[in-house]
Amino acid sequence: MDQLALLFVLLLGAVVSVPVGDRLRLPAPVLMTLLGILLAVLDFVPNVEIPPDLILPLLLPPLLYAAVRRTSWRQFAANVRPILLLAVALVLVTTACVAAVAHAIVPGLTVAAAVALGALVAPPDPVAATAVAGQLGLPRRLVSILEGEGLFNDVTAIVLYNVAIAAVVSGSFSPWEAALDLLLSAVVALGVGLVLGWGANKLLDLLGDPTLQIGLTLLVPYASYVLSEELHGSGVLAVLVTALFLAEYATDPDDVMTRLAGHTFWDIVDTLVTGVAFGLIGLELHNAIRTAQGRWGEMLGWAGAVVATVVVVRLLWLLPATWLTKRLHARRDYDEEIPTSWRETVIMWWSGMRGVASVALALAVPLTTDENTPFPDRNEIVFIAFGVIMATLVLQGLTLPTLVHWLGVEADTEREKAFEKELAVRAAKAAKRRLKEIEEVEELPDELSEQMLRRAFEIGVRISPEIGEDERREAHEKRVRRLKRVRRIQGEMLSAARHEVLSARNEPGADPEVVDRVLRHLDVRSLR
């Protein structure tokens, strides 16, 4: 098997792991990691030869962009305190605690090298958290905080990691320079993210064609990441800022085709890249195994101590942080955005899985210093890092569904249905207001006006059939049955039309492009 065949195996696994994970109620990223581990131990599977410095630039931008599409600036602003407590403060505390433990138990490990180890294992993975939380039906407030933590904690961790690595390689370290680097990195990233977000928004308007617009959205995250890194800023933060800007300002309510096609496209990208990323985690296990070199007992003990530190620190931090955040939100209108019970706090604690960023940073540890001497205890750092990744990702990922079931933590479906019903009512009222505005400037026959009024009501009913009880209680059930019947008959009619048009594709002299254009029109009509 060569590298290309291995890539196709991972892509196939990424697709298959989703339905398999749904059946087994296990996160697809965890299944892909297990597949990677299985492939890593097979003799005919080659070692992965991706340069470590390319793993983050290749995998993180599309994954971050896809994750941001599911959130909003308002959601982030509502959760800014718990997110900062987790994405910044907890990363700093975890890095310090891991560094202290590693420096104490690993003979000869310097303080700077220990800090590098702490920084690379400190941030929970944003992709794992999003994928796991999304499949388990957790409360939306919990998912929002986990997503926000995962999206922003890499910024802090990568800067700390770079500072620590530079200190080891050069032999010098300045706290003031480190703090300045962190500040400048954030400022540069914010500037790059905003400029590229604004420019991409303008360019999207100029392109017009949905295919070109979606293609641009694939390029923008990479451009934001690379440009920010070139200017010594945080590529991760730049991608997040760009994505949030586009999510806020680049949405045209009437651009139906781009929205539908873009949603499907990014779902595909998210599934495939996530699968490959976590498959690579499992495949890279051979690097950690190779570093043990017969010292399994000793190195497993070190890895176990660091795993315990990472897990315990997160729990000890979350308990007071949750209490503090609730106190700070006590007089706010959105206090539902934070964990409301110890059960939810436990789920947040056990969701701290490490993943793609930690693997990339571990593999990117330099081989030598500026003086051409071996990087101190590099093998030990890589082994411990992979021990933390495997323990948190596989162990916690496999047991999290069971823990969620035992604790009975689930989404507030009644609240979601109520909000959906509210939106349906607002949509129907907006349609009616627009109809009245049209009637003021155009003279509509009574029959047409009545028909359009029914259509406005049907807009809301199709979203949430329950609103009929509020507006037309007596006719609700009858209208819902009629709507279902109309949709069924219309669906069968459109299906017959699609079959007829598609059959013309193989007729002599038929132009496939014309057939596809007509078929696309029927497909869009079917969605209405």
Image (cartoon, helix red, strand yellow):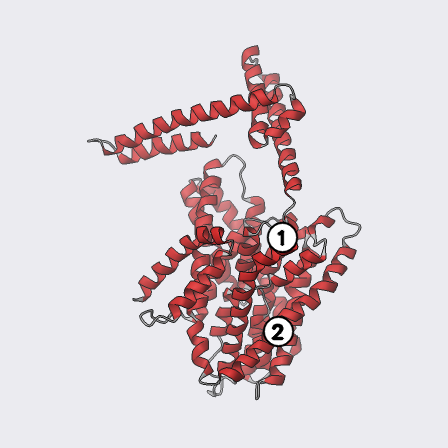
Viewport quadrant of the N terminus: bottom left
For residue 429, say whether it is visible.
no
Q: Nearer the viewer, residue 182 or 113?
A: 113
| Cα–Cα gap, marks 2 and 1 | 26 Å
User: In the image shown, does 333 or 405 lie closer to the viewer?
Assistant: 405
Q: Which residue is mark 1?
A: 144
Q: Secondary structure at mark 1?
A: helix
Instruction: Measuring from the top left, give residue 35's x and y in whole percent.
Output: 42, 63
The residue depicted at 67 percent of the width and 52 percent of the height is 77
Left or right side of 518 for 196: right
**Residue 475 occupies quadrant:** top right
Extreme front residue here?
A: 406
Mark carried by residue 308:
2
Q: Quick one: SS at disc 2?
A: helix
Identify the residue at the far top of this view. Answer: 446
Q: Residue at x 42, y 27 (%)?
A: 491
Q: Label 1 amino acid?
A: Ser
Which residue is drawn at the image coordinates 50% and 25% (left, top)?
A: 484
